[in-house]
Image (cartoon, grey):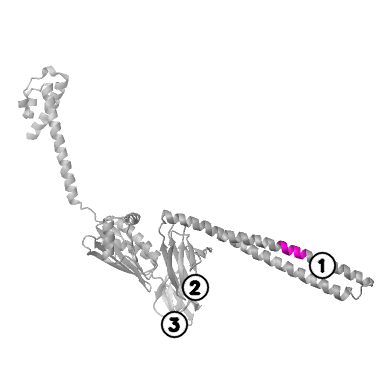
Amino acid sequence: MEQKRRKKYDRDFRIQAVQLVERPEQCQPVTPHRARHAFHLFSGHCFPVHTFGILFSSMRSSLFSILSLIFACTALFSQTLESPKPKIAVMDFEPRGISQFEAASLSDRFRSELIATRAFDVMERNQMDLVLKEQGFQQTGACSEASCIVEVGQLIAVQQMATGSIGKVGSIYSIEVKILDVGTGQIVKTVSEDCDCPIEQVLLTVMKRVAQKLAGMQVENQSAAIQIQKGNAGLFVKSTPSGAKIYIDGKLRDGRTPLTLQELMAGSHEVRVEKDTLESVRNVTLSDNQVAKVDMTLALKKTVVSLNTEPGEAEVYLNDSLAYGKRPLWTTPLITDTIIPGTYRLIIFKEGYALATQTMQIKPYSKNTYSFDLDPASAELAAQQKKFLKRRGHRLSSYKFMYLTLGTGAVAGGLFLASKLLYDNAKDQYDNEYKPAISSDYASQVRSDVASKKNISNGLAVAGIGASSLSGVFFLTFMYRFNF
């Protein structure tokens, strides 16, 4: 019954509202204090226009107040439910058994994966470097101590710092990452991961797992991430000498040559066998349900130097060759086996960037890897570099004048020598043949020959003078451009 009465009230209210607008003269006046109850609208009365406006304005103000209160409570409630993300920065991982370039690439990938977890407010690397540069932070060596890491965190105004190391022992990569609280200097969380896998898999899967663990997310079973795929192909490896280690696609296998390997995947594989300073590498193709055979003769390992810079296309010098204005030996990225083992002073130069130097110990029969992150040069240094490059250009171009000087000097010497020999021959012929037969017909012929030789000798001497003069001009040009 109550529900029917409410429906009737609603219908009557709409009728009364229409009457208020269309036939206001049929409305019976009612005082505002009687408008406290909606029933008065249904009793045949209606408000005067000004009274209805007062009521409507009061209702609208109340509605706005209620909505504002609801929104404020909702915002406050959402803030209490959603705690702010901790602001964190990632230091480049310390390399142990891998190159600095590889460690920097893995650090960048970890930073991206940490952002993808949405559990932290991660500071970008460029922003971090910019703030440290503005703060005048001077780092000498690796910043691996807790005090140094906390200092960096305080300078860049973050709450936490992520740091760690990436090492390689044999074919196993070991990653250890820890989060430090900048305020207390205490370790908040530590995650370790080991992977018997290529470095590409470390980049693609392991760094993601480490980031997810630090974020407290559910991570897939580790064994599934590093499991070696097994097939039904086989390979018999024999080597000369025997007793060598066997690597299949960069992974060390148990046993020594001669050895038969089972459960390999069909397809192309890189087989490398090594023993002490000897090694041999070969690509083989395996087929299902077949055992392939490979006989490898080991030779001395090459001494390989791998050099990378960021940015690339930097000039590489050894010892003092840059100071002497010589041309660069190589440009980066570089992989070469032409450097003799020993100790060198490595110099990396790129216009617009500061010089990078390092003492390089090239070990024989191994791969020596170096990497550099070049720092932008200051305005003063950039101006000095332009002057240096201009002077080096003049000096390098001066060498061709040095070669021309030597060449024309050699030609002048040859001409003078030929002139002298021809003149001496003419003189001997005159003394030995012309004087004894001075009254005969043969004497006139000898005299003609002697005169011809003297003329040729004089011509050679004149040519020699011209060549020596030209050599002097080239020499002066060389000295001017070399000392520009």
Residue 204 x %, y %: 36, 62
In the rendered image, the vertical position of residue 342 relative to residue 84, given as above or below:
below
Q: Nearer the viewer, residue 130 or 198?
A: 130
Residue 270 x %, y %: 46, 71
Q: Residue at x 88, y 71 (%)?
A: 446
For label 2, count other residues whose C-alpha is less than 10 Å away and answer few (under 14), some (14-19) or many (20+): few
Q: Nearer the viewer, residue 195 or 413?
A: 413
Q: Residue at x 39, y 78 (%)?
A: 254
**Label 2 or label 1, whichever comes before in sequence order:** 2
Under tag 1, what secondary structure?
Answer: helix
**Spatial CA span between label 2 and label 3:** 17 Å
Amino acid identity at mark 1? Lys
The magenta region covers 459-466
Residue 331 x %, y %: 49, 62
**Left or right placement of residue 183 versus residue 469 in this view:** left
Quarter of the picture holding the N terminus: top left
Kindly give the residue lying farthest to the right in the view shown.
440
Q: Which residue is mark 2?
A: 282
> Residue 460 in magenta?
yes
Q: Which residue is mark 1?
A: 454
Residue 327 x %, y %: 53, 63
Q: Nearer the viewer, residue 151 or 258?
A: 151
For label 3, count other residues whose C-alpha is less than 10 Å away and answer few (under 14), some (14-19) or many (20+): some
In the rendered image, the vertical position of residue 344 relative to residue 401, given as above or below:
below
Q: Which residue is mark 3?
A: 243
Where is residue 462, by image quadrant? bottom right
